[in-house]
Image: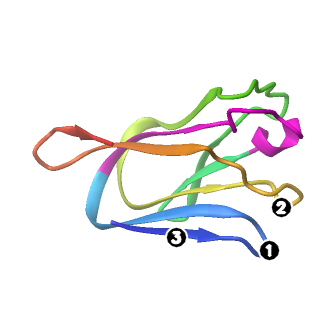
Amino acid sequence: MNFFYFFFSQPRVKVKFNYPIKFHEIRFYARPDHIFDQNRYRNICLFLDGIQKDCTDPGLVTKPGDQIRIKSEMPEMASEAEIRFPSESPGVVAELEIYYTFSEGKISV
């Protein structure tokens, strides 16, 4: 698994897997001390293999340390999982977890 963080035109976190996985969900946490801008956690979108699957609510209200979850409607095969932050806000994530299944059927983080 390769982990990339891009911070140019649109902040994003992209994870490329060596082999396709069955993606379940991605979880990340708001910064634990203080939320300076609620917009940092709104309209964050999940992409699997470059295709947008879901986004956080545009009216999301986040408290420090909140867990934020984005998932595909149904678990699906993918080689790449990515979250994209709105271009007007820097991406701020305290912790990031990806839940997926290997071919053996075990859920991994």
Along the viewing direction, whichever of 9 and 77 lies nearer the viewer: 9
| Left or right of 30, for residue 82 | left
Give residue 75's position: percent from left, percent from top.
36, 39
- What separation in Å lies between label 3 and label 2 (alpha carbons)? 17 Å
What amino acid type should be assigned to the residue bearing mark 1? Ser
At label 2, counting other C-alpha atoms closer than 10 Å, the crowd grade (few under 14, some 14-19, many 20 or more) is: some
Pair 3/1: label in front: 3
At label 1, counting other C-alpha atoms closer than 10 Å, the crowd grade (few under 14, some 14-19, many 20 or more) is: few
- Considering the numbered disc 3 on the image, is that residue within a helix, a strand or a loop? strand
Q: Which residues are magenta?
A: 22-43
The dot on residue 9 is 1
- Considering the numbered disc 1 on the image, is that residue within a helix, a strand or a loop? loop
The residue that disc 3 covers is: 4
The dot on residue 87 is 2
Pick whichever of labels 3 and 1 is earlier in the sequence.
Answer: 3
Along the viewing direction, whichever of 34 and 21 lies nearer the viewer: 34
What amino acid type should be assigned to the residue bearing mark 2? Ser
| Left or right of 43, for residue 103 | left
Q: Is residue 92 magenta?
A: no
Along the viewing direction, whichever of 2 and 24 lies nearer the viewer: 2
Pick whichever of labels 2 and 1 is earlier in the sequence.
Answer: 1
Q: Quadrant of the N terminus?
A: bottom left
- What separation in Å lies between label 2 and label 1 (alpha carbons)? 7 Å
Give residue 6's position: percent from left, percent from top.
64, 72
Give residue 58's position: percent from left, percent from top.
83, 35
Q: Is residue 6 above or below residue 21?
A: below
Q: Tags 2 and 1 in contact by the CB under 8 Å rule? A: yes
Seen at 54% across and 44% down, the residue is: 95
Q: Quadrant of the C terminus?
A: top left
